[in-house]
Amino acid sequence: MLGVADQFDCIPRVLGAQIRTTAWTGAAAKRFGSEWKGSHEPSLRKAAAHLRLSAERLLAQAKQQRLASSSELLLLAGQRPPHNLAQDPLQNLYQSNRASIATELQVLRAQRDDWLQMPVVGGLLSGIRYLPFDPLESIDKKIAWLRSLQAKPRNFLFVDTRQTGHAAEVFGRLDLARHVAVVVPGVGSDLGDFAQRSTLPAAVLQGAASDTASDTAVVQWLGYNPPPNLVQAALNGGESAQIAAVDGAKQLRGFVDYLRQMGVADVTVIGHSLGAYLASVAAGTGPGLNADRLVFAGSPGSLLPNVEELHLYGGPGSGSTVFFVEQGRDPISAAVFGRSLLGTNVADPDFGATQLLDGQAGFGNLLRNHSNYFRDPVTVQSVRAVIRGGP
């Protein structure tokens, strides 16, 4: 919303220059010029100031909410119960994030109504249309996000609506689970994906098992800023994708460390697309990744040339801890001379990962294979077996 205020700041200068240089003459032109200087231009500047003040106020409130949620997460990590998570702090964390979603939604709605009641904003949006953009578009999009997150009780470990949005949602009973999986999505992912809760890979992997019957919990984790589409991801030889993955790897390491500190005994990280490369960066740099197992689904490559150079919770990676799955012929994971788009081909025998079964033997649908990993029941069952530590 600060960006909207910046755009409003530019409008008086742009329109003012156009009005001064226009070939429009006559009484109507003079009358409009007088109205512009006496009414429209001051109103636009006032609107920009009002938007900026409101945006700064909202950002301050959102920061306080995020700090409250972070404090709950740190409290959980600090307790370190011997066998499972303490349920009350975890429920407090979920409730804190639900409250922050409700509060931000309420503030955004109030601000939207307030802005529309300002004559200059309401008039420009409803009919005059001097604006080269819709100042409420980003707000409406964020309101839609928040409404979808509020539709049913959701269990978020964190929610941050800034930019494309960050979130981690739990499916299953994290306090009772013996096995916990973390799903890392790829290019084009944003907070809007959480609107369709039942189609999230974490929801699919958790399945229809009741909370009390299942010994697993799966977390949909979006803690980084992936490129919005494949075109931007491929710019400069994939530089933007690699930068996003390096930054995300640090965040993923921290998140898995939190799970360990909270008492989770068994962790599997499942990376899809760029998320798979991100997981390889997390395991292949710094102290490594405190996960027991890695699954690369439709990976565009690995940072390092073999699994033994990946550092996991039990030591170096191996064929029993690092797995890959390719849906038929996936163009994103395709390789030439042992190299995929961003690194070593994880399907290369010399890389040392174990291949999982998928239900698309042969070519399948080249245009859809990359997005079908968690729609294929064979692949889903294969990954579920890995999460539970099975063959």
Image: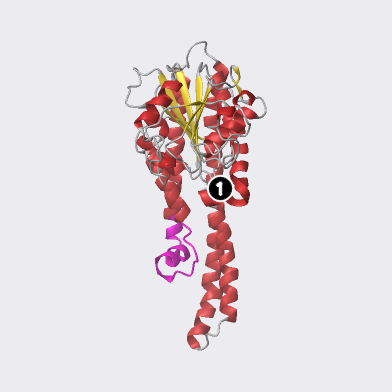
Nearer the observer, 12 or 282: 282
Tell me where residue 131 appears, x and y as whole percent.
Answer: 49, 66
- Give the residue number, with chain letter if any, for mark 1: 233
Work out whether residue 292 or residue 202 is closer to the camera in this orientation and state it. 292
Q: Which residue lies furthest to the right in this view?
A: 286
Q: At which x and y percent is residue 330? A: 46, 41
Residue located 36% across and 29% down the image: 378
Please say whether residue 227 is visible from this viewpoint. yes
Choose between 307 and 261: the one closer to the eye. 307
Q: What secondary structure do most residues of the magenta stretch adopt?
A: helix
Disc 1 packing (10 Å; few <14; some 14–19; many ≥20) = many
The structure residue drawn at horizontal position 59% and vertical position 31%, both measured from the top left corner, is 280
- Residue 333 magenta: no
Q: Measured from the top left, where is residue 150 in percent x and y? A: 38, 38
**Residue at the outermost top position:** 82
Residue, far bottom: 26
Q: Which residue is drawn at 56% across and 66% down?
A: 11
Verify whether residue 132 appears in magenta. yes
Coordinates of residue 272 in the picture (x, y in percent): 49, 35
Name the side, left or right, on which 103 lies relative to 15: left
Secondary structure at badge 1 equals helix
For the C terminus, the image quarter is top left
Q: Give the range drawn in magenta.
A: 114-136
Residue 74 in view (yes/no): no
Q: How many marks?
A: 1
Left or right? Give the position of 2 relative to 180: right
Q: What residue type is labelled 1?
A: Ala
Q: Does 360 appear above or below 57?
A: above
Nearest the eye: 212 or 107: 212
